[in-house]
Image (cartoon, grey):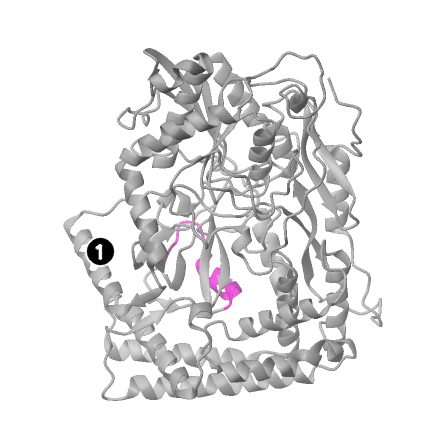
Amino acid sequence: MRRTDAPRPGSTRRLLVWLVAIATMAAALPAGASSFGSPELTCRRSWDLIQNLLKRHISFRALNPELKERAIDAYIEGIDPSKSLFLASEVDKLRRDLTGVFFGIQNGECETLDGLQADLVKRYERMEKEVRAFVSSPDYALDEDVRLILDPEKRGHPFDDAARRDLVERLVHFQMSNYLSSEMEVDKAKEKLIHRYELMTRRARELEPRDTYSNFLNAFASALDPHSTYYPPEAVEDFEIQMRLSLDGIGVALSSKDGYSIVERIIPGGATDKAGVLEPGDKIIAVAQEGEDFVDIIDMSLRDVVSMIRGERGTKVRLTVLRKADTTERLEVEIERDKVTIEDAAATLDFEEVEIGGRKRKLAILDLPTFYGDPDPSKRQSSRDVRDLLRQVKEAKADGLLLDLSRNGGGKLESSVDIAGLFIRDGGIVAVKNVFQEVQFLEDQDEDIVYDGPLVILTSRITASASEIVAGAMKDYRRAVIVGDDHTFGKGTVQSFIHQPGRLGAIKVTTALFFRPGGASTQHSGVAADVVLPSLFATDELGERYTPYSLDSQTIAPFLGPAGAQNGIAPISTGLATAWKPIDAGLIAELSRRSAARIAQDEEFKKIEEQLAKVRAEDDVIHLAELIRERKEAEAKDADGTTDETVVDGETKGASDADASESKTPAADGDDESYTAPEDEKPTPQRLEALRILADLVELEESPRASWHASQSASPSESLSSPQ
């Protein structure tokens, strides 16, 4: 039965047509451009691109003082990410000098930007000269006692020239240590380091005016929100390669922040996922091709970093990584490049047998790493795969289901709607508000409930975008218990990629917002867990709300359908029998109580809590001697044939409608290989506890509430890790 008393303009098909129309809309020719030429990026045409971004953005529709200030700050951040070129007083002057830049661009006058670029060349020349003199001195020696505040935002710009030179020298010590860690001779390390600064100066000299305007446009786009971007013509091809996942690589999505290349997301089924050597939040500081020396990539453009990491399938690349754990560790990892296929990222199903209330019960675990789907609807789709697996769950007479979305960074919007509909009879799944403030609703189009038993959904800070739609709908319909990090990533925005004419590149701009059936946006808050589990990803470094200039959350009127109404959510009585036992506050409280008691005794969770406490207490200062000591200890372990096992409980943001730095939904590339997890791969403590919570849920739904405190079905000592 379909609810008809609430307005529901449009269907899934209509909305998808609408989104495609926006994403493929050809931008009008810039004012004054000839329709017969191939326009190139100039100062005057930069203004047209600024207007194109504003015309389509969901929030900013005009150039106001706040946006101007944000754009100027973003531009300064972009030209000096390590805060080693400008003094604090010089930055203040630079902000004042740039206040009229928009008026100048509007009139085709970019002398301020051109002059700043010339000044940057001089600053790079000065730094190159200082570094050359410092390391070439006969008295130079690596100072292992040097300390450095890793985050440039926390250390800020130097206040005087002496402090600036001191910062450069500290950076040099860490960079030299990076070279020396690979057994490089000191003289060779000095030569490599000087060459690195020579390259930085050369890149600054070789920048053309259009590169300067491109950098400013990208800063302006990023000031709108974290996911809006300007792409020069050379970068458009890179973006489209990422969309197709057609290039061999290591299977990670990278972003650039404060001069560091940061692992944002690990692509399920990719080379890195299989190797298990990187984690979201890792800072890559150096890259080495197979058989070659490391190249320091701090302050290198993200596009150049990506081109170094990419390569032919079967070749290897080595990375030097900074990882924040108890302390900041430095690791060297080697990854063999490969392709990602749908087979690699496909949904999988396992079963666990546990004892609940004196009876053997079967629990199903459905792992969905991404919402994949071939553009051809007749070919493989995640929604069909999940439907088939849920039918297997029913046929196996499983007593409960754990849907693992903890690694799921998103994917096809249509697939997320279809998959959410497999657990309810019908009703609204997600709403999308566009730039015209029009709201369209996507509903479950199938009244069939494929699985109606006890359901737990495992999430994390990595769970983003389309996966937040599924988790949010199930929470609002009280259909499932959400377990995991305190909240999911919190990306509730939609982007459109719009090609510009001629050689003007393209823009990616945020054009819409997602909303859950209860009316709340997934933006910022994401989906809160009903039962929170300790996790190393629950930090202020992961999540939409912690990114600069992220859009505020909004709300709309709830649009819960009959499935919600029959479970007492919407004020409508349909007379239908309840298709499942709705999750209520009392049930959540008891599940939380039992889980907290287990976590307090669990050694894995104790370690996580201790690591989190140390991270919170850190002042983000890294000690070079500590890095060197940890490297030597790691080398000694390798020599003994022993290694520390790293447990990874997920990955970070990256839906198919997210950042340009993110890889997109996998598409079949002709490979027949599929990835099977090693039999001895250790489940994360979060998944094990989620299974115990599912066991509790099965027991509690079959027991009178008066007996709930009498037993605790699943203890930490029970084996929940062997597939049956």
Crowding at mark 1 (Cα within 10 Å: few <14, some 14-19, many 20+): some
One can see residue 499 in this view:
yes
Nearer-the-camera pick, 623 or 290: 623
Picture residue at 70% right of the left edge, 34% below the top? 558
- Looking at numbered disc 1 in the image, what kind of residue is underneath it? Ala
Look at the image and tell me in which quarter the N terminus lies: top right
Give the SS element for disc 1. helix
Image position of 70 (left or right of 534): right
Picture residue at 53% right of the left edge, 64% below the top? 303
Look at the image and tell me in which quarter the C terminus lies: top left
Residue 547 falls in which quadrant of the image? bottom right
Q: Is residue 124 above or below residue 620?
A: below
Q: Position of residue 555 (x, y in %)?
A: 68, 43
Residue that extends furthest to the left in the rendered view of this protein: 640
Q: Mark 1 highlights which residue?
A: 634
Q: Is residue 175 above or below residue 264?
A: below
Say if the magenta span includes residue 310: yes
Q: Position of residue 253 (x, y in %)?
A: 49, 52
Q: Position of residue 443 (x, y in %)?
A: 70, 29
Q: Position of residue 390 (x, y in %)?
A: 52, 21
Say if the magenta span includes residue 596: no
One can see residue 684 in this view:
no
In this picture, which residue range is highlighted in magenta?
A: 301-319
Residue 627 falls in which quadrant of the image? bottom left
Nearer-the-camera pick, 637 or 155: 155
Q: Is residue 33 above or below residue 433?
A: below
